């Protein structure tokens, strides 16, 4: 169903995004190992929070609570923002839940799903810039930190993929 996210073409795009991060200083192995241990659980929590956030945004978009009506009326936030945000959050939840098991098994596919969730988060940030004048600097810093950490842990998943391929021969 989601093979296009993990195929060779997708991996080529990932390699292009990774290039600028290769020359940055690397984290100590102990910190990387810590992140690798908690990432699956962070993905699971992120998926749960994304579902609840999507429900909230749908309610705000359809004016099902007072906060949504106030934000639309007094702050001029368009309902389309909440509805688009809800859809994006559902995509984020899907990617997070899809990544959970492969991340626990240290398979590169799980890491790739988390990569794509970062890309979707960038789209969500752009949506915030357009509709609610969200801080561009905060968004850029968040994206850079997210990709830096993501590429720092990538090797832990590539080693597992290499070991599995070697064992099959």
Image (tube, rainbow, N blue to C red):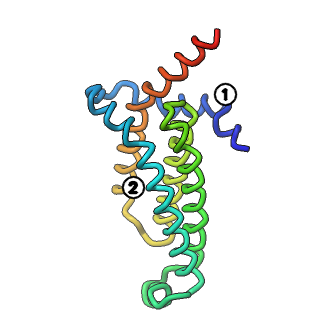
> Tag 1: Cα neighbours inside 10 Å, few (<14), some, or many (≥20)?
few
Q: In the image, residue 25 lies at what x, y percent?
A: 29, 27
Q: Is mark 2 on a helix, strand or loop?
A: helix
Q: 42 left or right of 80?
A: left
The N terminus sits in image quarter: top right
* Number of dots carrying numbers: 2
Residue drawn at x 41%, y 49% as measured from the top left: 42
Q: Using the image as rendered, state which of residue 107 and residue 88 is in the foreground.
A: 107
Mark closest to the chain's N terminus, 1 or 2: 1
The C terminus sits in image quarter: top right
Q: Residue furthest right?
A: 1
Q: In the image, residue 96 lies at what x, y percent?
A: 53, 50
Q: Using the image as rendered, state which of residue 52 and residue 82 is in the foreground.
A: 52
Query: Would you place residue 8 above or below residue 137 in this image?
Result: above
> Tag 2: Cα neighbours inside 10 Å, few (<14), some, or many (≥20)?
some
Disc on res. 139: 2
* Viewer-side label of 1, 2: 1
Disc 1: which residue: 8
Q: 82 left or right of 1?
A: left
Q: In the image, residue 32 lies at what x, y percent?
A: 33, 31
Residue drawn at x 54%, y 17% as measured from the top left: 162
Query: Would you place residue 91 above or below residue 11 in this image?
Result: below
**Distance CA(mark 1)–CA(mark 2):** 29 Å
Residue drawn at x 59%, y 68% as measured from the top left: 84
Label 2 near label 1: C-beta < 8 Å?
A: no
Disc on res. 59: none
Q: Using the image as rendered, state which of residue 154 and residue 80 is in the foreground.
A: 154
């Amino acid at each position: 169903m989601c093979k296009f996210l993990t195929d060779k073409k997708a991996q080529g795009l990932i390699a292009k995004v990774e290039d600028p991060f290769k020359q940055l200083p690397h984290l100590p192995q102990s910190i990387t190992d810590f992140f690798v241990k908690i990432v699956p659980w962070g993905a699971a929590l992120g998926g749960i929070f994304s579902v609840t956030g999507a429900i909230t945004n749908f309610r705000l978009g359809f004016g099902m609570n007072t906060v949504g009506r106030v934000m639309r009326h007094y702050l001029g936030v368009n309902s389309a923002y909440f509805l688009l945000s809800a859809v994006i959050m559902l995509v984020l939840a899907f990617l997070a839940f899809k990544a959970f098991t492969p991340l626990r098994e240290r398979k590169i596919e799980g890491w790739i799903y988390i990569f794509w969730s970062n890309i979707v988060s960038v789209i969500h940030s752009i949506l915030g810039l357009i509709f609610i004048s969200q801080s561009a600097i905060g968004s850029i810093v968040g994206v850079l930190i997210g990709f830096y950490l993501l590429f720092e842990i990538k090797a832990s998943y590539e080693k597992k993929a290499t070991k599995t391929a070697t064992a099959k021969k």
